[in-house]
Amino acid sequence: MGRPEKVRLGEILIQQKLLTEEQLKSALEEQKKSGRRLGRVVIEKGYVTEDQISQALARQLGVPFISLKQFNTKREVTIKLPETQARRFRALVLEDTGRTYKVGMADPTDLTAYDELVRVLKRDIELAVVSETELLRVIDRTYRRTEQITGLAHELEAEVGDTVVVDFGALVMTPGLEEAPVVKLLQTVFEDATQARASDIHIEPQARRLQIRFRIDGVLHLQTETDPKIASAVVLRLKLMSGLDISEKRLPQDGRFNIKIGTNQIDVRISTMPTQYGESVVMRLLNQASGMLGLDNIGFPPDLLVRLREVIHRPNGMVLVTGPTGSGKTTTLYAALGELNTPERKIITVEDPVEYRLNGINQVQVNEKIELSFERVLRSALRQDPDVILVGEMRDQPTVETGLRAAITGHMVFSTLHTNDAVSTPVRLLDMGAPRYMVALSLHMVIAQRLVRVICESCTQAHELLPNEREWLRQELSDKVDGHAYKHGKGCTHCNGTGYLGRTGIYEALEMTSPVVEAANHDDIQNFIRVAREQMAGKTLRRHAAQLVAAGTTTVEEAMRVSNQFED
């Protein structure tokens, strides 16, 4: 196909009976007010989906529609078109046929973009229509900045030479800092981490190298390695950005700062720690634009979701969420708060740190330096007439007792605790010195959770069970093991070759029913554990993980890996 014809989107959607005249009229009026494109307006109004528009354009122009979820792009082909033009023209090079390029465009009716693409690529192009949302995701994954980061690291290495601290300390105080190699390096690292969906950035000095790693879907991936001479310059700049003491290198420090990547506001929590070869830095990235998930969207089994909703809407009691760092506890608690956040309720949170800003909720940051501890803030919060209280973590006996007392005296209290599973949580509260009667009366539900990686939809394929995998599944699914089709991801450009894309939760819950409360009231820990496990039979973390494997959501390997974290 040659140069596309000029067409009107509204007329196409009416001809193909995807829009009515009245809907088009309403959309055009909205377009005049907002100045946005007609396609975006009709999607936001819910008249049509993005795929319906793309398929309608493809039919009208006689070109294929390609779903990028199922299309495995090749980076060496895609980068024939520079990133700037790819984003500007919403276009992606999909195939190199030798004489032409197959190019996917979100809007193939943009004749100016078509002409510019032919000029830049210096070849004729064959058009295909792709979804704009999927196209932007592929662009984010494809145009990674590994080579750019390495180049900037070498540039910084040449500039700092052998006198890193002195020279850089002078450099950061000079005008035009935005052009300094260390600033450009850090900006590029943050941009790449955001595009790769990284939750953490690790900057770690070693004996002969400085390594930068990203944690993606809970697993660390090496981004780049460079000369360790630049480590001091990088750490110093990060300390300045977060307001830490640049002269203190012997003690760990914690701080935070905000950066803007594209249209996204990223809240960065930074931790520094002295190591043998210099200061190690770990940064947690919190994307404020991603929004909070609701209870319906975080992977709760339907029966557990019903029980949880009934519990959190009670006027008083305590709900604890347990699991290791990075298991999604905060997401679960915030999802519960989001459901309870109405004008009729006063909600106060006591956190360290405040991870996400929630409208309509009073959030308090703990500050141990001025003796503003969890227990002290919690006591003050109780005098603020709250209905719901979230305590970031039950760290010590005074906090535990104050929280349990608040739950008895008419407040709904949410918090977290670091235990392996739901059954051991009430026992842990007793070990921390909480009175037995308060645990039995106040605690209503304990949720234990982990996160498992989800198989990439774009490269999923059948998987033949290994003997050890079959045996592991048999313990949970018994004779139903052979009744399912198991899957795994072979690795593609969408998932950076890992076979996984995204994560979901696995959960178990201990509800403090009458038999469990009765057992908790007696000084027989083993009997309590037996009664609690009998109640939870068939609804454990392992069972939920096995069910996700059987449903084709995750792999046996991943379920077994995560299960090792909470084995007895």
Image (tube, rainbow, N blue to C red):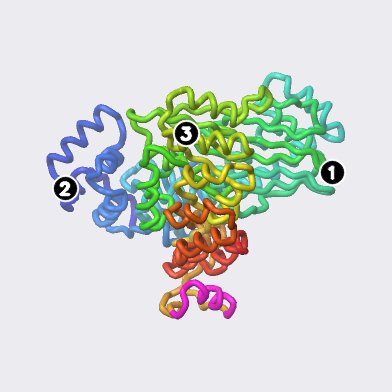
- The boundaries of the magenta stretch are 467-479
Quadrant housing the C terminus = bottom right
Relative height, residue 371 to residue 73 (above, below): above
> Mark 3: which secondary structure?
strand
Does residue 189 appear in this view? yes
- Type of residue at label 1? Gln
Q: In this view, does 31 lie to the left or right of 164?
A: left
- Give the residue pinned by disc 3: 389
Determine which quarter of the picture holds residue 259: top right
Indicate the position of residue 182 as horizontal and vertical percent values: 71, 33
Indicate the position of residue 396 as horizontal and vertical percent values: 64, 38
Q: Do the residues labelled 2 and 1 touch (CB within 8 Å)?
A: no
Which residue ends up furthest to the left in the rendered image?
Answer: 21
Q: Looking at the image, is mark 1 or mark 3 earlier in the sequence?
A: 1
Instruction: Tell me if residue 472 is in the magenta stretch.
Output: yes
- Spatial separation of the CA atoms under disc 3 and disc 2: 52 Å
Q: Identify the disc placed on residue 99.
A: none
Q: In this view, does 169 lie to the left or right of 454?
A: right
> Mark 2: which secondary structure?
helix
- Give the residue pinned by disc 2: 14
Question: Toward the viewer: 355 or 28?
Answer: 355
> Mark 1: which secondary structure?
loop
Q: Looking at the image, is mark 3 or mark 2 earlier in the sequence?
A: 2
Q: Are marks 3 and 2 in contact (CB under 8 Å)?
A: no
Question: Toward the viewer: 506 or 495?
Answer: 506
- Give the residue pinned by disc 1: 276
